[in-house]
Image (spheres, helix red, strand yellow):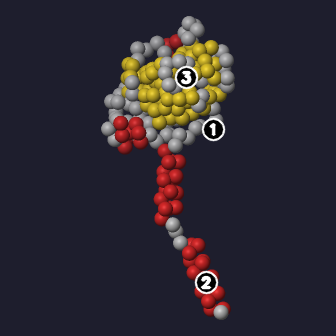
Amino acid sequence: MRPVVLALICVSAVACNRVDPAQTAAATATASAAATAPVVVEKPIALAELKAEQVAASPALSDACNLESIAGTVVPDGRPIESDKRVFAVSGWAIDDKAKAAPAELDLRAYSTSGDGRVWQIALPRTVARPDVQAARGGSEKLLNSGFSAQVDAAGLPPGQYSLRLTFQDGGTETICDNGRAVVLK
């Protein structure tokens, strides 16, 4: 009787240690999805006001970007997103069409729509893998990390509406992507 019990214990231990291929595939898929999921910067980045000469250049306009969400809302059209909070998330993607790569540096600019001409800017980290953008734009490995996700600290901005635009160097030319995004700060 003892040998039978001992054999059952050994078989149970081996069965418990056996790796289920379905679980391994699910774990791999979950890890892969987590690797490409947007990573929001924990510490908000403060907008800094630009001087008039910093925004006076004649930039090229581009459609090689998309500011997809503001304050957790996927922007469905050109209507401004209202934010009760002064710290809000932004996410999307941008590419340098000339270099066929993610831009080396990417900034978000907030243009006051009050008519005072004031503009604020922050640097955005480009750490989000965007295989969808990579595939749609030709598949180059240099396009994979074209996504961004960040917390914007707009505490220093007066209440009002701000037009949001992405700006970067596209083959040495300052490029502004404007896809009609705006935020209203209360």
* Count of numbered circles in the view: 3
Q: What amino acid is at disc 3?
A: Gln
The nearer-to-camera label among 2 and 3 is: 2
Q: What amino acid is at disc 2?
A: Leu
Q: Are marks 1 and 3 in contact (CB under 8 Å)?
A: no
Q: Residue at x 46, y 24 (%)?
A: 167
- Residue 98 location (% of width, % of height): 33, 30
The residue pinned by badge 3 equals 121
Q: Residue at x 64, y 19 (%)?
A: 185
- Residue 79 location (% of width, % of height): 53, 18
Circle 2 sits in a helix, a strand or a loop, which is it? helix
N-terminal of the pair, mark 1 or mark 2, is: 2
Is residue 50 at least partly visible in the picture? no
The nearer-to-camera label among 1 and 2 is: 2
Q: Residue at x 66, y 20 (%)?
A: 156
Q: Is residue 153 above or below residue 37?
A: above
Q: Is residue 99 above or below residue 53?
A: below
Marking on residue 8: 2
Image quadrant where one finds the C terminus = top right
Marking on residue 42: 1
Front-lying residue, 100 or 12: 12
Q: Are marks 2 and 3 in contact (CB under 8 Å)?
A: no
Circle 1 sits in a helix, a strand or a loop, which is it? loop
Q: Quick check: 140 left or right of 154? A: left
Q: Badge 3, how many Cα within 10 Å: few under 14, some, many 20+?
A: many
Alpha-carbon span between mark 2 and mark 3 = 68 Å
